[in-house]
Amino acid sequence: MIRNSKTFILGLAMMVSFICLFAYILSPSFGNGRNGLQYSDDLFNSLSKGSAYFIKEESIKAEQQVGSSIDVSIKASDTAEAQKWGKIFSTADSSVIVDNDKVTIKGDLGKIMKETLNDSDALYNNDGKKIKDKYGYEAREVMYGWYNAYKKIDKELKTQGKFKESNAIGTLSKKVIEPAYNYYGIEIKYVRNNIAIVTFMLIFYVIYTLWYGFAIYYLYDGLGITMTKAAKKSEA
């Protein structure tokens, strides 16, 4: 039973308009067949990519490692992966020997890191063709190879007591290889160039959430459903 028709009608109007707008948001009306949720997801992915570029600062660290030699033997999951690692590391002026699933790498860590940074920069800028032309493998496949090989090298360097070198490639993997791999194919955007749309979306989210909340509140109020504290019982 409706107890307060005024607040009930207001709540109903707010709920209907909320649902209509939500239906529009879910419609493919935001370019390239995307709905509003996909559009906002793509936007914030692009913005987060714009803030995940650490290649310049890692290039400085790589320069500091020039002259630091490494001599490690790592084991791949199979012969095919070992051959892939061999091809990747041989581009960095390293001596590479592949024996079945075992790969022995001798070289300058700084030069190796610089080669990784070059590939990561190409992938970050969605230039997968450059990497494929260089190695003959798909771009993400190459970066995955760098990542897995570095994990093995990291363990070897720690075993050898070369913790400074181990830390250098660990940071490189986390701050350069992972973002380049994860953001491949995503357009780069920066918050400074999209302040208006970002501000609008954040304000809209807050208003839209309150909109729904007040719609529920007015509907319940119109039906006479309210939340009140239970009266305290008084003893005789």
Image (cartoon, rainbow, N blue to C red):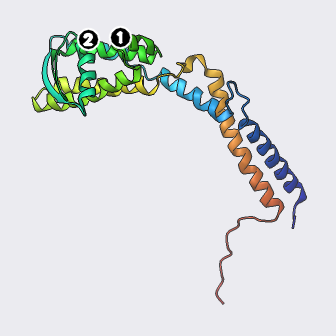
Q: Measure how far apart labels 1 and 2 are at the Cα level.
A: 9 Å
Q: Circle 1 sits in a helix, a strand or a loop, which is it? A: helix
Percent coordinates x, y for residue 27 in the rendering: 73, 35
Residue 150 visible in the current orientation: no
Asked whether, in this view, residue 94 is left or right of residue 48, the answer is left
Percent coordinates x, y for residue 157 in the rendering: 15, 28
Circle 1 packing at 10 Å, graded few (<14), some (14-19), many (20+), is: some
Quadrant in which residue 173 is drawn: top left
Q: Nearer the viewer, residue 177 or 50?
A: 177
| Pointer 1 residue | 134
Looking at this rendering, what residue extends furthest in the bottom direction? 236
Percent coordinates x, y for residue 205 in the rendering: 66, 37
Identified at 75% across, 41% down, the residue is 23
Q: Amino acid at mark 2?
A: Thr
155 lies above or below 135: below
Looking at this rendering, what residue extends furthest in the left direction? 160
Asked whether, in this view, residue 100 is left or right of residue 212, the answer is left
Quadrant in which residue 235 is drawn: bottom right
Percent coordinates x, y for residue 43 in the rendering: 59, 26
Q: Give the tally of numbered discs.
A: 2
Q: Amino acid at mark 1?
A: Lys
166 lies above or below 227: above
Identified at 11% across, 32% down, the residue is 159
| Pointer 2 residue | 91
